[in-house]
Image (cartoon, helix red, strand yellow):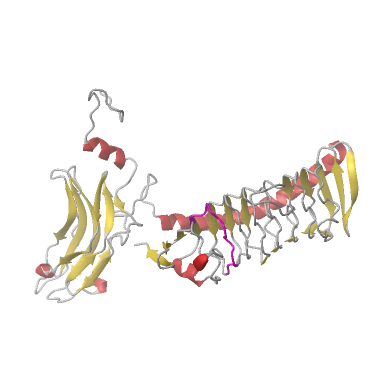
Amino acid sequence: MSFSYGFFNAQNLDRVYTAEDFTAYLSSLICNGILDTYRQCFAPTIKNLAITFGTGKAWIDGHYFISDTLHTIDLSSYVDESLNRYVAIGIYCDRSTRTCGIRILAGTAATSPTIPAFTNNNVTTYLTLAVVRLRAGTTAILDSDLTDCRADESKCGYCKCILGKCRVTEMLVEMAKTNATLDELQKRLDAMNSQISELQTKVDDLTAGEILATGQCGENIYYVLYDNGKLLLRGTGATYDYTSRDSVFYQNDKIKEIVLSNGITGLGDRLFYHCANAKTVSLPATLTSIGDSAFAQEDAAIGYTAGLTSVTIPQAVTAIQSYAFYHTAIAEVTVPASVKTWGKYAFSGCAKLKTARVACDSIGAFAFTRCTALSSLTISANCRTFGENMLTYCESLTAITYEGTIAQWNAITKPVNWMSSGEHFYNDYLQKIQCIDGYLEYDPENNVWNEVKNG
């Protein structure tokens, strides 16, 4: 028995590695196949009796092959005047000659010919790009004569990572399905959490400690604030609306945790305005609206955050009004598909917000303005309208994940300044929109988004 290992720095040339060592290592990380994001990805086109393959890159057993120009193959010499024939065209890696390239495998001409297939062995490995049917005496290849094999994992397939022959597009499609399932599960979870909160409310009434304050904040809603910082709201319907400083909870630094009972449907304007120490809130499954500046912190210096550090918006919420979470310290948020009204500046100034997902059909104006830490934004294919300046000063956002096609993205109604209010209405940091069938890449020189389709 022998052991092998690597890689280590050499001392006096006591560690020497070969190309085979590196290809063996790479082949354990990158599977065989072509890259679905590399330019034209060997896309085949036909003209008369010639087939042209686009540029592309492939990995075969740890070796790479790059074609950076169009490659045309003339198949006229394979046409039989009286019999039909198939030819296979593929990328090869020949370890005996230490080369990679494109080869043609011609089948036998016959009335009913068989399709030739490349055979892999311990020396040569193939990735079949296409199979072409050459009809007897033909002078031109038809679209129906061409079989594109690139997506066939038994013949070629796409490679990306150690997960195997997985395409980014397929992963995004599955992710969209998973998110839909998660949304449904979240509705159930919201209901369960509301029941738990109800039970916790009853327990807290008995064990929470000394009562600091009680009162009414809605026609049918009452509150209790305990000395441990927990604020309990119980009742049905919506709370009152307030102005900036007349809320019963305005600037109350003793509030640390907010729990709302099932049955409450609306949070009024400025209800918890400038409650800087209120870090958590439990929202009931019955909640349908969050009022103007409901959890907002007072306008302060750029980068200032306080109040909530986390929030789960229930699946029943249909309205999030302006400034609802302005300058709060939340790090992650999902806006559910149920939301139909999204006021301006809803999450503006949330400088600690890193991850956001939008599942609803529109995004409000100035929605994420000055969310300087936002680096992951996922937008559902449900979204149809963008608000102005919704991503202004999102300096960490270099890419958006969109759960629809490029065509669907282009169909979204967008104001010219949806990214920024600066020159050319462009946010200098956003470079890419990843869609399920490709991506859009920003060209700053011409101020346009260029489409790159997969395959």
Which one is in front, 56 or 293?
A: 293
Q: Residue at x 16, y 57 (%)?
A: 103
Give how far across and how far down residue 143 sits, in percent. Answer: 26, 73
Q: Is residue 105 visible?
A: yes
Q: Is 398 within the magenta?
A: yes
**Is 407 positioned to the left or the right of 147 in the image?**
right
The reply to whether residue 155 is in sight is no
Q: Position of residue 423 (x, y in %)?
A: 51, 66
On the picture, is 178 further left or further right than 124? right
Identify whether 454 is placed above or below 141: above
Foreground: 219 or 110?
219
Asked whether, in this view, residue 214 is left or right of residue 42, the answer is right
Task: Check residue 316 for magenta coloring.
Answer: no
Would you place residue 290 above or below residue 206 in this image?
Answer: below
Which secondary structure class fits the magenta region best? loop
* Image: magenta residue range: 385-399
> Residue 14: image x %, image y %?
23, 23
Q: Which of the 4 image quarters holds residue 158? A: bottom left
Picture residue at 28% right of the left edge, 27% below the top: 4
